[in-house]
Image (cartoon, rainbow, N blue to C red):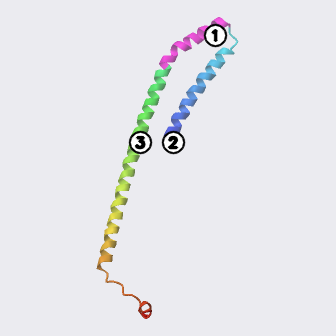
């Protein structure tokens, strides 16, 4: 879960940086021509930035996937061990119950005869 939060955090941070940059450019004390030129350059750089972010997200997704598979395998191993222990305990209890002699009815039950 911690890795998932870090991916969300990084995405939010990049999004916030983009919004902050755009806001800063729009309120900058430059002429509108200069601001438009800067915006045009920024817009041209967006595909490259998007590709970098996409690569980072894919790497993080691969790491999370590998981690999830490892955790799943560990959980399955523990579950198999627990089932085997339960089956063994059941078999032992069954053997104990089949080897015990029948418990005799107490004398009080015998006293109640009509």
Residue 91 or 40: which is nearer the viewer? 91
Question: In what quadrant of the picture does the C terminus appear?
Answer: bottom left
**Circle 2 sits on which residue?**
2
For marks 1 and 3 on the same chain, the one whose residue lies earlier in the sequence: 1
Disc 3 packing (10 Å; few <14; some 14–19; many ≥20):
few
Seen at 66% across and 7% down, the residue is 32
Mark 2 secondary-structure assignment: helix
Q: Residue at x 34, y 56 (%)?
A: 80
Q: Secondary structure at mark 3?
A: helix
Q: Is residue 70 magenta?
A: no
Q: Which residues are magenta?
A: 31-48
Q: Residue at x 45, y 34 (%)?
A: 60
* Gap in angstroms between the C-alphas marked 1 and 3: 45 Å
In the displayed image of the protein, which residue is found farthest to the front? 114
Return the residue at label 1: 35
| Quarter where residue 35 is shown | top right
Question: Where is residue 3 shown, x and y percent of the image?
Answer: 49, 39
**Which residue does the image show at 59% across and 22% down from the upper left?**
18
Q: Position of residue 113 (x, y in %)?
A: 42, 93
Most common secondary structure along the magenta stretch: helix
Q: Residue 25 shows which numbered tag? A: none
Asked whether the residues under the numbered discs 1 and 3 touch, taking CB atoms below 8 Å apart as contact, a structural biologist would say: no
- Number of residues whose C-alpha sits closer than 10 Å to that of mark 2, classed few (under 14), some (14–19) or many (20 or more): few
Above or below, 62 against 102 in this view is above
Residue designated by label 3: 67
Q: Provide residue 23's location: percent of width, then percent of height.
A: 65, 19
Q: Earlier in the sequence, mark 3 or mark 2?
A: 2
């Amino acid at each position: 879960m911690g890795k998932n939060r870090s991916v969300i955090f990084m995405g939010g941070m990049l999004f916030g940086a983009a919004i902050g940059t755009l806001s800063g450019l729009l309120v900058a004390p430059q002429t509108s021509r200069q601001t438009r030129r800067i915006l045009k350059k920024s817009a041209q750089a967006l595909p490259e930035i998007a590709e970098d972010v996409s690569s980072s997200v894919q790497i993080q997704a691969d790491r999370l996937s590998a981690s999830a598979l490892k955790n799943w395998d560990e959980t399955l191993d523990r579950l198999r061990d627990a089932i085997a222990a339960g089956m063994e305990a059941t078999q032992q209890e069954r053997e104990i119950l089949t080897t015990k002699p029948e418990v005799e009815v107490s004398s009080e039950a015998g006293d109640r005869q009509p």
